[in-house]
Amino acid sequence: MNIGMTYDLRSDYLARGYSLDETAEFDSLRTIEGIESALVAAGHAVERIGGIDALVERLSGGRRWDLVFNIAEGLHGFGREAAIPALLEAWRIPCTFSDSLTLAVCLHKATTKRLVRDAGIPTPDFRVVERLGDVDGFSLEFPVFAKPVAEGTSKGVTGASLVEDERALRRVCECLLLRHAQPVLVERYLPGREFTVGILGSGGSARVLGVMEVVADGGGSGAVYSYAAKQEYEERVSYRLVSDREAMASAELAVQAWAALGCRDAGRVDVRLDARGVPMFIEANPLPGLNPDDSDLPIICRLAGISYSDLITGIVQLALKRQGEAVEPMMAHAEAWR
């Protein structure tokens, strides 16, 4: 099968003058090579395409593929993750992971939470700060947690994101509004355990690959899984696969949210417990990082005994199954775990 790969290579953007912060979500050559190697080993012919500009050029030149393995994050706007899938949908070329609507919805965390809440899935109360004046008369009980409304890889999340009073909230929101040029999501802080749930499959047929507990910066109720902690995960973050009662309840909530949002193929849902141990939806990641070494979904698979190659080929086969073609080689892992 002829598979194209769309991605945003971080080194390319750095060479064009973009900053480390602007390119934080983009992929390393290690990721591109890892995916390509897994696909080639499975017998596929792989063509590296790159980002949206390269894709437009090749499409206009008549190039086509049986499937596109898409991990491109995009650069501008709330629809940046949806741009390549939307283009491929217009050209009727299938691609991996969720469609353009789901990717646009899930990038904007407040929109995601509204849809999840409407589906009856618990999520902490929140407000959206679009301008600094929105902090006046703030109605949520402190402490709260503040982060950009549409960033991934914990961009904009620091120790200061955990906010104890209105004065600190004003200071944090001012900084985030200026630095990220987008609204700030402020939600009630949850002091309980933090999980990220790896999911394989689409909609109601999705299954859990594993529940990974994340303990950042030495643990404690004030620990923050920040951008800096992710970059230094070996020293600052502890990951462990868990299957206790709270983890199982979080897995069930994650699968419900995945289906409600229409997510496909593979990804993660982040869940945190409130003070009573009740799991709450935090956010969904339907376009997960796939660095073989340090991205959360490959780490979950590694802890669960699933190889990186099996993860990548499983994603492809699930995408093909949606087109009326083949198999479910990894579902046995997921079913056995549950």
Image (tube, helix red, strand yellow):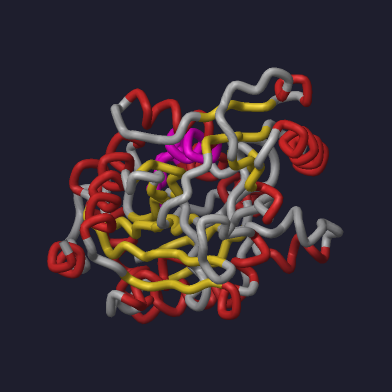
Apparent side of residue 176 relative to residue 46 in the rendered image (left or right)? right
Relative side of 127 to 328, left or right: right
- Image: magenta residue range: 89-108
**Image height of 34 relative to 319, above or below:** below
Residue 66 seen from this side: no
* Front residue of 111 and 70: 111
- Looking at the figure, which quarter contains the C terminus? bottom left
From what the image shows, is residue 222 above or below residue 86? below
Looking at the image, which is closer to me, 33 or 158? 158
**Residue 295 appears left or right of 249:** right
Q: Is residue 3 above or below residue 174?
A: below
Q: Quadrant of residue 258?
A: top left
Which quadrant of the figure contains the N terminus?
Answer: bottom left
Q: Residue at x 34, y 59 (%)?
A: 198
Residue beneath the point at 59% across and 68% down: 217
Q: x and y percent of residue 148 in the render?
A: 65, 41
Q: Quadrant of residue 16?
A: bottom right
Query: Magenta stretch: residue 46 in it?
Result: no
What x and y, as percent, mark residue 224?
A: 58, 57
Residue 329 percent location from the top left of the image: 19, 68
Rendered view: 197 above or below 166: below
Residue 63 screen position, x and y as percent = 52, 53
Q: Quadrant of residue 102?
A: top left
For the image, the number of numbered tags is 0
